[in-house]
Image (tube, rainbow, N blue to C red):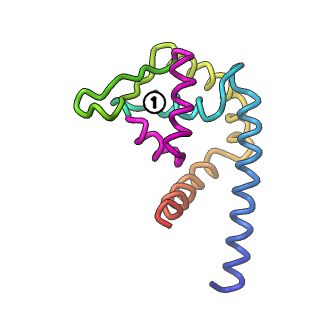
Amino acid sequence: MSTANQSLAVALFSELLATDVLARQLLSANLPKGMELNQFSVLNHLSRQAEERTPAQLARTFNVTRGAMTNTLSKLEWAGFIHIRPDWQDARSKRVKISDSGRRACESAIEALAPILNKVVDQIGSETVRAALPVLREMRAQLARI
């Protein structure tokens, strides 16, 4: 890698990491009381899925250990935001589905976060954000392959 590309890569990842920290702090501070960012992320994902997911699938999706996902799912189940049932095809596995109250909680969180997210997009410009998305998706895909 050339020195110029190395400097570019370091600058890019420095910005991504700093943005990640700021985004997590801002979003966490504005979620409904008692909801954690990882819980919102799982609820948001499940709300967009037509089919139930296994805990292992969710752990892979969020790049976390099965234990970490089990902890998050336990908290969501306790709150009544998800249903966990045995997998009738594979007794060793479970299936996870968002509940009606989970959908309402997710919608409430999105309503709380929308003004912040909209402000950022408005300030950057929707065309710039739209242009950045394919680059960020490709970066995520490349990192997942490493």
Magenta residues (range): 54-80
Asked whether, in this view, residue 116 is left or right of residue 102, the answer is right
- Residue 115, given in percent of the width and then of the height, sits at 71, 28
Q: Please identify the dominant SS of the magenta region.
A: helix
- Which residue shows up at 43% across the image and 20% down it? 83
- Residue 126, given in percent of the width and then of the height, sits at 63, 44
Between 126 and 84, which is closer to the camera in this rendering? Answer: 84
The residue that disc 1 covers is: 46
- Which residue shows up at 76% across the image and 38% down it? 25
- Which residue shows up at 71% across the image and 19% down it? 33
Whether residue 61 is in magenta: the answer is: yes
The image quarter containing residue 8 is bottom right
Amino acid type, residue under disc 1 in the picture: Leu
Reply above or below: 63 against 41: below
Reply above or below: 4 against 95: below
Reply above or below: 126 against 137: above
Residue lying furthest left: 89
- Which residue shows up at 34% across the image and 34% down it? 93
Between 9 and 59, which is closer to the camera in this rendering? Answer: 59
Residue lying furthest front: 92
